[in-house]
Image (cartoon, rainbow, N blue to C red):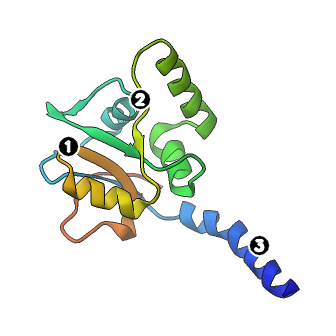
């Protein structure tokens, strides 16, 4: 039992590192056009609500999720604390609410496929066949 717990702890320590090596892609509902980094940053901070004049609905994973942390670092250029603090102030001054959160990237994929205008991020290896990739991160 002791060895099992040691291996389990090692797995949990290594797992986020392995996830950090995978490319993140942003997927959008079938009709959404490609987006650049600046547009995605503005979308996920509530400064814009559309991509090339098409309404967009950003979806987040919950705080603490390794994929969300990677997205915030690579795409947004922020830490979890900075992003959460940004939305705390924005909500306080009446400038909106943070993007809706879904529990898993599988839920994000289902939501994006079924909801016009939806945008979410997933590991590149988990893009569904025929998925509309609107942005690819750079490692």
In this figure, which residue is indicated by the disc labeled 3? 9
Q: How crowded is mark 2: few (under 14 residues within 10 Å), some or many (20 or more)?
A: many
In this figure, which residue is indicated by the disc labeled 1? 117
Q: Identify the image quadrant of the N terminus.
A: bottom right
In this figure, which residue is indicated by the disc labeled 2? 45
Residue 95 in picture, x, y percent from top left:
40, 16
Q: Residues within 10 Å of mark 3 (few under 14, many from 20)?
A: few
- Which of marks 1 and 2 precedes in the sequence? 2
Residue 47 in picture, x, y percent from top left:
35, 23
Quarter where residue 107 is shown: bottom left
| Identity of the residue drawn at 33% across and 41% down | 58
Residue 5 in picture, x, y percent from top left:
80, 79
Quarter where residue 17 is shown: bottom right
* Disc 2, SS: loop
**91 left or right, relative to 52:** right
| Identity of the residue drawn at 51% across and 43% down | 72
């Amino acid at each position: 039992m002791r060895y099992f717990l040691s291996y389990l702890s090692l797995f949990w320590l290594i797992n986020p590192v392995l996830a950090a090596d995978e490319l993140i892609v942003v997927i959008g509902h079938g009709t959404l056009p490609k987006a650049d980094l600046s547009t995605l940053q503005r979308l996920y901070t509530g400064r814009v609500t559309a991509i090339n004049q098409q309404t967009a609905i950003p979806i987040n994973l919950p705080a603490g999720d390794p994929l969300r942390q990677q997205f915030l670092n690579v795409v947004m250029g922020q830490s979890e604390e900075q992003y959460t603090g940004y939305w705390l102030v924005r909500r306080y001054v009446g400038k909106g609410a943070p993007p809706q959160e879904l529990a898993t990237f599988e839920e994000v994929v289902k939501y994006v496929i079924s909801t016009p205008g939806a945008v979410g991020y997933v590991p590149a290896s988990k893009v569904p066949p025929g998925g509309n990739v609107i942005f690819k991160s750079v490692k």
